[in-house]
Amino acid sequence: MNSFKQAKHFIFTSTPGSGKTSVIIELEKLGHTVIHEAATDVISIEQAKGCDAPWEEPKFIDQIVRMQKERQMNFTGNIQFYDRSPFCSYALGKYLAHWKGIEFTPSPILLDEIDRCLKNGVYQNRIFFFENLGFIEHTDARKISYEDALIFEQIHLDVYKEFGFDIMMVPKELTVIQRCEFILERAIC
């Protein structure tokens, strides 16, 4: 039997600044298997090398996809929670193309990874989408405006719908602990 089918891999996604990472950290504290976001790490690595805006580099999406795949292939556990997925990388590519005013053309690396995930049923069909909180706190990796975050949020929703995922909205009015409970009730059933 395919090991991907045995484990439940749940995707967490959203626009930046939705509180998703806070929930991931809390689930990890509670002993659950979590896989942290790759994009933030790619940005940190590239900025440490002197690239101030790695998201403007042509290889950026592929770097994220490779790191996501490596992390996904190296984790075990019956239930795993993923802070983003290759489908988020696809949404990011669409957003960056929108921002640059060009047509989005996904790379072969991205398309191959999406195809692998879909064919092998790597992720559960139900994803957890975190509603935006109504504001953005900027970091070294997060420089997006709130207005652009709303565009990015819609692109994410559209991409996950395009690929046939069932979107479970995680209410923003819940505390971090309540969001964890909301997710666990729906993931463990």
Image (cartoon, rainbow, N blue to C red):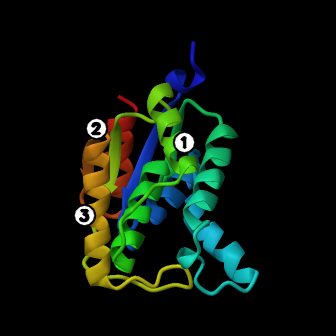
The answer to which of 54 and 136 lies nearer the viewer is 54
Q: Position of residue 70 (x, y in %)?
A: 68, 46
- Residue at 61% over, 42% down: 72
Left or right of 131? Residue 187 is: right
Q: Nearer the viewer, mark 3 or mark 1?
A: 1
Residue 50, placed above or below residue 1: below
For mark 3, what is the residue?
154
The first of marks 3 and 1 along the sequence is 1
State the CA–CA distance, disc 3 to disc 1.
Answer: 22 Å
The first of marks 2 and 3 along the sequence is 3
Left or right of 165? Residue 59 is: right
Q: Nearer the viewer, mark 2 or mark 1?
A: 1
For mark 2, what is the residue?
164
Q: Is residue 133 visible?
A: no
- Residue at 35% over, 34% down: 125
- Residue at 56% over, 85% down: 140
State the CA–CA distance, disc 2 to disc 1.
Answer: 16 Å
Quarter occupied by the N terminus: top right
The first of marks 2 and 1 along the sequence is 1
- The reply to whether callout 2 and callout 3 are in contact (CB within 8 Å) is no
Q: Specify the amino acid type for callout 1.
A: Glu
For mark 1, what is the residue?
113
Quarter occupied by the C terminus: top left
Left or right of 28? Residue 13 is: left
Specify the label residue 33 is tagged with: none
State the CA–CA distance, disc 2 to disc 3.
Answer: 15 Å
Q: Secondary structure at mark 1?
A: helix
- Residue 53's quadrant in the figure? bottom right
Q: Position of residue 124 (x, y in %)?
A: 40, 34
Q: Position of residue 116 (x, y in %)?
A: 53, 34
